[in-house]
Amino acid sequence: MTAAPLLSLTWTDHVTGRRGHLVVDRLVRGVASGGLRMREGCTAEEVAGLARGMTMKEALHYDPSARYVPLGGAKGGIDCDPRSPEAYGVLVRYLRAMRPYVERFWTTGEDLGLTQETVDRAVAEAGLDSSVQAVFPLLEDEAAARKRLADAFALQVDGIGLDALVGGLGVAESVLVALDRAGRPHAGTRVSVQGFGTMGAATARFLARAGLTVVAVADVRGTVVNPDGLDVEALIAARDGHGTVDRAALRPGDREAPGDAWLAVDAEVLVPAAVSYAIGAAEQGRIRARWIAEAANMPVLPEAEEALAARGVTVLPDVVVNSCTNAWWWWTLFGDVEADADQSFARVRSAMRDLTGAVLDRAEADGVLPRTAAHALVAERLPVIAERYGWY
């Protein structure tokens, strides 16, 4: 998975000078899938790594019996603070510049720094039909598929959209599989979450509902800590559009700590769900957790992962753990699930239990890290997909 990407380009905004990137790592049936992120400091190298990760996620969910056929991997990224007053204009102009790619072979959606609602609004303003319109020619019944996806996006479950929950459910299910295999009871297992946007909040909700205790949540303002457990639902209700918690909602037992305190909290499970490259060689030494579930893309650097493994910390890799947001879009669009929350949740749970179990089994059998095991599964599946559908 270290070959050069199929396509890589950099765009410069003529108004602000901000830069944006698009990397298409691989095409399957002429189409690639991967979200669009916006953050200050986003680089072409980062986007290329994310695009490779999308190729892996797609391949890991390959099921020859399913209607959904995995696509290739791609990613977009814009170097801009999403909270900046100029951010939305930059986003629209980026999408106008990328219009030929979105129309023909890049399907995209929300990622770090952006919500799907914002992406959809900017897509319309840029003159595009949909952020996933490139996949429409592959559908048997486009009208029915688009209605099914729209109906699914309209569903709310306890105050949160179904689309904002499925990714976090996948992360939570991966954690539960790891705990179950280790014989660790859910009750009494403590969790620290970095990032409280779409993925982090949903992960915290499902882990709390499974009986785990969320003891720390970090956002851009710092870390909120309570060793006895935070009220996850109250914190979710107190978020703004960027995942920042209103501190007025904190209870007497909650306390505020520095932004990096989430790393060293006394917890068994760590969930980095925000930026890439959050855990390097220095940061890993502060971690006391037994498991790290990569809800974010590329949060643990290789040298940190090796050091963590040497002291018995298991990193559940991003290409497995956070892959269900993407997969659910396609399960719904291709008709493997209907616009139904219970059906969607059941599919996510089943898929993630099978996939996480397969990766951990392979890691144990080969004596390698779970990430290495996941990459080995990808290397086996990509030629199978290529043989069936071609290399592009």
Image (cartoon, rainbow, N blue to C red):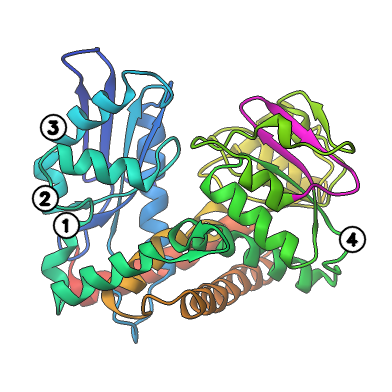
Q: Earlier in the sequence, mark 2 or mark 3?
A: 3
Q: Horizontal placement of 363 versus 160: left or right?
A: right
Callout 1: SS: helix
Task: Give the magenta part as a residue range.
Answer: 215-231
Residue beneath disc 1: 133
Q: Are marks 4 and 3 in contact (CB under 8 Å)?
A: no
Asked if the magenta segment contains residue 124, the reply would be no
> In whole angstroms, how far apart are the C-alphas of marks 1 and 4?
45 Å
Q: Horizontal placement of 335 versus 247: left or right?
A: left
Callout 2: SS: helix
Q: Horizontal placement of 297 versus 37: left or right?
A: right
Quadrant of the image for the C terminus? bottom left
- Location of residue 376 in the rendering, given as x and y in whole percent from the top left corner: 49, 63
Relative height, residue 360 to residue 249 (above, below)? below
> In whole angstroms, how far apart are the C-alphas of marks 3 and 1?
16 Å
Q: Are marks 2 and 1 in contact (CB under 8 Å)?
A: yes
> In whole angstroms, how far apart are the C-alphas of marks 4 and 3?
51 Å
Q: Are marks 2 and 3 in contact (CB under 8 Å)?
A: no
Question: Mark on residue 103?
Answer: 2
What residue is rendered at 53% in x and 79% in y? 346
> In whole angstroms, how far apart are the C-alphas of marks 4 and 2?
49 Å
Asked if the magenta segment contains residue 216, the reply would be yes
Q: Residues within 10 Å of mark 2 (few under 14, many from 20)?
A: some
Q: Residue furthest front?
A: 248
Q: Residues within 10 Å of mark 3 (few under 14, many from 20)?
A: some
Residue beneath disc 3: 97
Q: Earlier in the sequence, mark 3 or mark 1?
A: 3
Q: Horizontal placement of 115 versus 251: left or right?
A: left
Three-letter code, disc 2: Glu
Three-letter code, disc 3: Ala
